[in-house]
Image: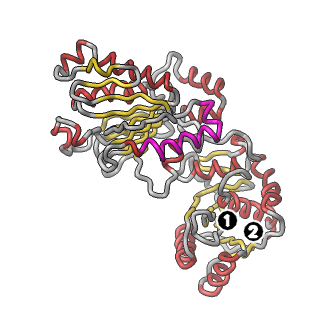
Amino acid sequence: MRRIIFNMPPRSMKSMCVSVAWPAWILGNQPTARIIVASYSQRLSEKHSLDTRCVMQSSWYRELFPEVELSTEQNTKYKFQTVQRGYRIAISVGGTLTGEGGNFIIVDDPLSSTQALSETFRKRATNWFDQTLISRLNNRKKGVIVLVMHRLHQEDLTGHLLSKLKNIWHCICLLMISENKEIIYSIKKPAHPVSVIQVARSTINEYTSNKTALRARPAKMLYSREEGQLLYSVDEGKKEVKMIKAELGSYAFAAQYQQNPLPLSSGIIKLEWLKRYRNFPDNLSHVTQSWDTAVSTSNSSNFSVCTTWAKAGNKFYLLDVYRTKLEYPKLKEQVLSLAARWTPHAISIEAKTSGQQLVQELKASSDLPVIEIVPHDDKLARFHQIVPIIESGKVFLPHQAIWLNDFEYEILMFPEAHHNDQVDSTVQYLQWMRESTSRVAAIRTL
C-alpha cells in the first residue's frame, strides 16, 4: 500500500508514531530516504522535526542504527540531513517546496479545528495537496503518501480524497468508542471475520534493506476490542469521555473522536431528530421503494437513488439506500434487481424525464406495484411538509450502514448540500405515506 489514511482521535499518539518515530525508523533502515512532513502550521511541523532529530541523536538509536549519522552541513528545524544525503523536511500546508522531492510524504493534521470550519482553508489545503504536494514525489508510482488526522469536516482532506471516483486510498479508521466488535489483522483478513479493519504490514519496498519484511505471512490477529470499548484508557474511563463530548458538543465529538463528521446545524433537520435501530422490529410491514432518477450520468448531474423503507405502526424505518449514476437501460435492470431483493409492496417513481419512461416500461413489462408520483409543489415546500414527521421521532435509521454517512450528511445539510437526490427520495416516500394513509391497505400484500 502506497496511499494510506489514518483517522484517529486526539491524544492517540498518532503524530508521535507517524511524524516522529516513523521517519526516524525509515532513515534508520535506509539513510538515503527523502521524507517530507507537513502540518497545518510551521511551528507544529518543526516541533515534530525536532522530536525526530532528538530520537535519532539518542544513544539507543545510534546503537540500533550505527551507520546513520546526521550531517553538520544541513541540520535545522526545517530540514536535517544524513551524511548519506537522506533528509527530513518540515513544512506547513500551503508552503513551498521548490527544488525539493521525497520518497515519502507525510501529512499530519492538515487543518486545525478552527480552519476546518472555513471553506477557504479547506479548499486551500485540498488544492495545495492536489496541485503542489503530490508533484513533489520523486517517483509517483513507487512513492508513499500517508495522511494522519482526526476528522473535522465532511469536506476535510480525508473526505476530499475518499470522494474521488477512482479511490486509491486505504483508510484505517479507529474510533474512540468502538461501535461494533473489531478485529485488526496483519496482511490479509480471514475468511469469516466478525468485523475487520484490514491492516497491511508496513513496508518501504525498495527503500528498505530488510528484505524479509516483504515476504507474505499468514494472517495474524494483532488487536481486538468489544463494542463500546475505548480505543485507549483515560483517567476516569467512559465518564471522562462523556465529559469530553459535553465540552466539545456532539458534532465536534462525532468528527474528532468517532471519525464521523456531520455538518453543523445549518440545515433544517437536526441530528437528534433522527432515531436509530439495531434490529428490524417484528411488526415491519409495507415495504416501499422510492426512486429518484437522474436525467444523465454526467459529473455535474445528480445520482439515481432508491431508498427502501418499511413501516411499523406509525414509524418509518430506512432499510437500504442505493445510489449511483446509470444510463437508462442499466437503470431499469437495477430497479428490477432491487425489487427482487426486497419484494416491495409499492415502488414509487417520480414522473420526470427518465422516471416517466421507467414507469411506462415497468407497467407494460412487469407486474411490479409501480406508483407514478407527480409532485405539485417545489422541492423545498415538499421538504417542509415532511419535517414534522422527522422532528417527532418517527423516522429511524440503522445504527450502522456503509451508506449512512452520506445519507446523514445530505439530509442534515439540505438545502445547502451539493446533491439532494437521497433527500428527494426520502421526501417522496414520507409525503406519499402521509397523504395516502387510507390507501396503504389497498396495496398488495406479500
Q: Return the x and y of residue 360 as percentages of the image width and height.
A: 67, 83
Q: On screen, 271 above or below 421?
A: above
C-beta proximity under 8 Å, tags 1 and 2: yes
Q: Is 343 left or right of 30, judged from the image as shown?
A: right
Q: Return the x and y of residue 98 as percentages of the image width and height.
A: 42, 37
Q: On screen, 147 above or below 436?
A: above
Element type at marker 1?
strand
The residue wearing badge 1 is 286
Q: Return the x and y of residue 110 as percentages of the image width and height.
A: 51, 34
**Are there few (<14), some (14-19), or many (20+) residues within 10 Å of tag 2?**
some
Quadrant containing the C terminus is bottom right
Amino acid marked by disc 1:
His
Q: On screen, 328 above or below 130?
A: below
Q: Return the x and y of residue 350 as percentages of the image width and height.
A: 71, 71
Give the main secondary structure of the magenta stretch.
Answer: helix
Q: Is 290 left or right of 137, judged from the image as shown?
A: right
Checking the image for residue 190, the label placed there is: none
The residue wearing badge 2 is 440
Would you say residue 246 sits in the magenta stretch?
no
Would you say residue 127 sits in the magenta stretch?
yes
Q: On screen, 328 above or below 3?
A: below
Query: In which quarter of the view is residue 84 placed?
Result: top left
Amino acid marked by disc 2:
Val
Q: What separation in Å lies between label 1 and label 2 (alpha carbons)?
A: 8 Å
Q: How is the image coloured?
A: secondary structure
- Point out the stretch of residues depicted in magenta: 113-134
Please tell me which residue lies in front, 286 or 36. Answer: 36
